[in-house]
Image (spheres, rainbow, N blue to C red):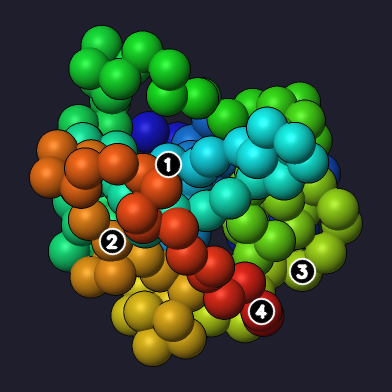
């Protein structure tokens, strides 16, 4: 493991090391929630149903390193992919930096505290349900507050 550069999050995404890229993630868990697409409008509809690997209490992946073995369609975000995926939340650190915007004020890289995200209501921790018990996704539509 290499050292993280000072204020690395202000660098262009393409300039980040793998370790810095991973550290940029705020851990909100929103990208691990199932989405539906309206067939008529193409609109992305959000649910509160989490991937089976997401710990619904902490919004952390239970097996991040091996997740693709258990969830083959799990996306490994890259600087290019971040610009193409339409359903990432506006508060996502990757999205914000791709748009040359600052990190949200609650981001742990700014506050030094992962609890700041929870206090700001930016995490799905404790507010989602596992796909293993959810039933039909249509019964779990929600709108996450994505304000900063």
Question: In front: mark 2 or mark 3?
Answer: 2
The reply to whether discs 1 and 2 touch (Cβ–Cβ < 8 Å) is no
Q: Nearer the viewer, mark 4 or mark 3?
A: 4
Disc 2 on helix, strand or loop? Answer: loop
Residue hosting label 2 = 128
**Who comes first in sequence, dot 4 or dot 3?**
3
Nearest to N terminus: mark 1 or mark 2 = 1
Please say if the residues under marks 4 and 1 sit with CB atoms less than 8 Å apart: no
Q: Secondary structure at mark 3?
A: loop
Depicted 102 relative to depicted 35: above or below: below
Gap in angstroms between the C-alphas marked 4 and 3? 14 Å
Q: Residue beneath label 1, please?
A: 34
Residue 81 coordinates in the image, percent (x, y):
70, 27
Where residue 5 sits in the image (x, y, percent)? 60, 51
Task: Check whether the beta carbons of the residues at disc 4 and disc 3 lie within 8 A of each other.
Answer: no
Residue that numbered label 3 is attached to: 102
- Looking at this rendering, what residue extends furthest in the front direction? 40
Which residue appears farthest toward the bottom when viewing the image?
Answer: 119
Apparent side of residue 23 relative to residue 9 in the rendered image (left or right): left
Q: Mark 4 or mark 1, which is nearer to you?
A: 1
Q: Secondary structure at mark 4?
A: loop
| Residue 112 sits in quarter | bottom left
Q: In the image shown, does 106 or 141 lie closer to the viewer?
A: 141
Distance CA(mark 3)–CA(mark 1): 27 Å
Label 1 Cα neighbours within 10 Å, binned few <14 / some 14-19 / many ≥20: some
Q: What percent of the width, then of the height, locates residue 139?
A: 34, 54
Which numbered circle lies on residue 61?
Answer: none
Q: Quadrant of the C terminus?
A: bottom right
């Amino acid at each position: 493991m290499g050292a993280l550069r000072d204020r690395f999050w202000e660098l262009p995404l393409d300039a980040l090391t793998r370790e810095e890229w991973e550290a940029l993630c705020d851990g909100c868990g929103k990208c691990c929630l199932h989405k539906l697409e309206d067939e008529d409008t193409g609109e992305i509809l959000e649910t509160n149903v989490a991937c089976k690997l997401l710990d619904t209490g902490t919004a952390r992946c239970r097996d991040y390193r091996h997740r693709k073995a258990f969830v083959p369609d799990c996306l490994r975000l890259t600087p290019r992919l971040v610009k193409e995926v339409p359903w990432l939340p506006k508060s996502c650190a990757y999205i914000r930096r791709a748009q040359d915007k600052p990190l949200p004020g609650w981001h742990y890289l700014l506050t030094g505290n992962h609890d700041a995200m929870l206090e700001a209501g930016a995490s799905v921790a404790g507010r989602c349900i596992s796909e293993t018990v959810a039933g039909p996704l249509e019964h779990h539509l929600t709108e996450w507050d994505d304000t900063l």
